[in-house]
Amino acid sequence: MVVETERDGTTWYECEECGLMFDDTEDATQHESNCDAEDPSYIQ
């Protein structure tokens, strides 16, 4: 499920599985459908 959060006057959409945040609800929903609930591989 995508959670809507407001920070610094901007609305963000957060993936509940991994915590990754998006500024577009469609991007967040698409990510969440493919999320494996682990840390993103590009963060090292």
Image (tube, helix red, strand yellow):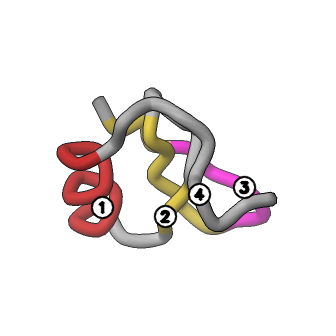
Q: What kind of element bears circle 4? A: loop
Mark 2 is surrounded, within 10 Å at the Cα level, by few (under 14), some (14 to 19) or many (20 or more) other residues, namely: some
* Disc 1 versus disc 3: nearer the observer: 1
- Comparing 16 with 5, the one in front is 16
Locate residue 27, reporting x and y percent.
30, 68
- Nearer to us of marks 1 and 4 is 4
- The one nearer the camera, 5 or 32, is 32
**Which mark is in front, 4 or 2?**
4
The Cα–Cα distance between marks 2 and 1, rounded to whole angstroms, is 7 Å
Res. 42 image quadrant = bottom right
Quadrant containing the N terminus is: top left
Q: Is residue 21 above or below residue 10?
A: above
Residue 22: mark: 2
Q: CA distance from mark 1 to mark 3?
A: 15 Å
Q: Amino acid at mark 3?
A: Arg
The amino acid beneath tag 1 is Thr
Q: Which residue is mark 3?
A: 7
The range drawn in magenta is 5-9
Q: Residue 41: which disc?
A: 4
Badge number at residue 25 = 1
On screen, residue 38 versus residue 29, left or right, reads right
